[in-house]
Amino acid sequence: MESFETERLRFRAWTEADAEDLFLCASDPDVGERAGWPPHQTVEDSLMVIKNIFSNGHTWALELKETGHVIGCMGYYPHGESNIEIGEHDVEVGYWIGKPYWNKGLCTEALRAMIDYCFRRRGYNNIWADYFVDNPASGRVMEKCGFIDTGRTNILSKLYHSDSRPVKIMKLFNWYVAGTEGKPTLLLLPGLGVSYQIFFPLIELLKEEFRIYAFQVDGFTLGRCTRFDSVDGQAGRVIDFIRTQCGGHVDCIYGLSLGGKILSRVLERNEVTVDHAIMDAAPLLPLPRWLEGPLRYYQSFNVWTCYHWTGFWRFVFHSHYFDVLLDECRKVFPFGGRRSVLDGYKSVYTNKLEAIYGADIHFWYGTKEAFVAKPQAEHLLKLYPSVHIEVFPKMNHGQMLVDHPDEVACRLLSIT
């Protein structure tokens, strides 16, 4: 069984020597009641649980590194073992922690590590979790880690005292899937410093017309810490996704800013079939070398202030567009941090689009960013003379998507 660590916790296999530590935590009725099992009555009860339940190969003891004592438990249940209905390549996670260690951020720290393990080391598609509706604190931990309320509740009769206590079902996506099976496929690629959730209003408008996949860019993921490697690395992930999930063909891809840059590299590599491609405010040209470093750090400082001074910037800008961007920054910054912003801008600012292939390519930008976007459009026009360029009056970087998702939805429908 694999062991791993966080800043304060060590994930390791349970041993019989942990029975006393387990009993100290699990004998408290406030712990078991919230987690769905009866409080342990004796150390022998705890020993039997370790032998018969926790020795399944995917349940870890949470050892506090400072003391060497076990203070909780974290595990996952694959398809066929889960408490709720999940996909074949999905997993359900469960956890609890001893009462003396509540409200110290330890559950959040542990859950983020478990998410990273399930996605990166085990390769699961999506992660599910549930909590009793009378235990909202557990739900807040899930929300901090990027889980979304599915809108479903359930009665899990095999859990302790659960007959009249429904659980709320939450889900965390490696990539977000929505829409109607059998409809044309639409892949959405978000920009730097925002998550796939920026597409939710657009998805709501298009879910009857498309099978929609909203991608997560490394460094700007929800629920797990990741590092941005390069535009080409992310393009490779998109290509692999299209091959494995879409049979090597996708009807339409819409890339916002960095997502548009990644899309341009997908088209440049020409390894999968994309019928329609829309690059919204995509940076396609490198910066002069003398400007690349200073601008990277300037942009990184901007993102840092958006995260730490959110209230100040809301007061300054006071608009729906900036409110959405600030909310997105607050969601993703804890998982990628300043390093991902710096790495992302470095890759964007130093890569030049040299060629592009596709049946139908579109480039969008707003007049408020024309001084930056127009040279990108002109470069693309030289590489691909039949490109469709559309300029949105009085719009800023990605503002059409944020403020007018209905307009974007209409354009996507007309294009496809």
Image: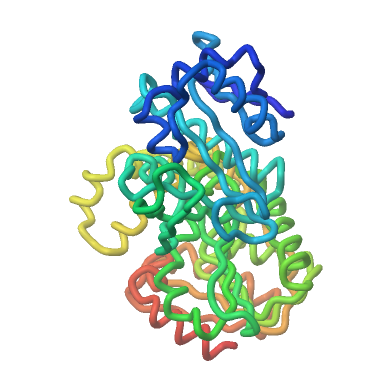
Query: Which residue is outermost to the right?
Result: 271
Is residue 118 at all visible to an observer of this figure?
A: yes
Q: Is residue 105 above or below residue 370?
A: above
Extreme residue in the top direction? 67
Q: Residue at x 73, y 72 (%)?
A: 246
Colour scheme of the rendered structure? rainbow
Q: Residue 401 location in percent, x, y?
A: 41, 71
**Could you say which quadrant of the image residue 362 lies in?**
bottom right
Location of residue 178 (image quadrant) = bottom right
In the displayed structure, 256 sits above or below 118; it is below
- In the picture provided, is 28 more to the left or to the right than 72? left
For residue 59, which quarter of the picture? top right
Residue 290 in view, yes or no: no
**Where's the C terminus, which quadrant?**
bottom right
Residue 140: horizontal and vertical position, in percent? 36, 43
Residue 37 higher or lower than 328, as above or below: above
Q: Give the total number of marks visible in the rendering.
A: 0
Q: Quadrant of the N terminus?
A: top right
Residue at far left of view: 315
Percent position (x, y) of residue 265?
A: 70, 62
Q: Which residue is rendered at x = 50% and y = 60% of the image?
A: 196
Pick the residue in front: 95 or 283. Answer: 95
The image shows residue 79, relative to residue 26, as above or below, that is below
What percent of the width, then of the height, locates residue 17?
Answer: 63, 12
Query: Which residue occupies 44% across, 79% down?
Result: 408
The residue under the point 53% across, 41% down is: 94
Instruction: Say left or right for 76 vs 302.
Output: right
Q: Nearer the viewer, residue 167 or 220?
A: 167
Camera-side residue of 126 and 410: 126
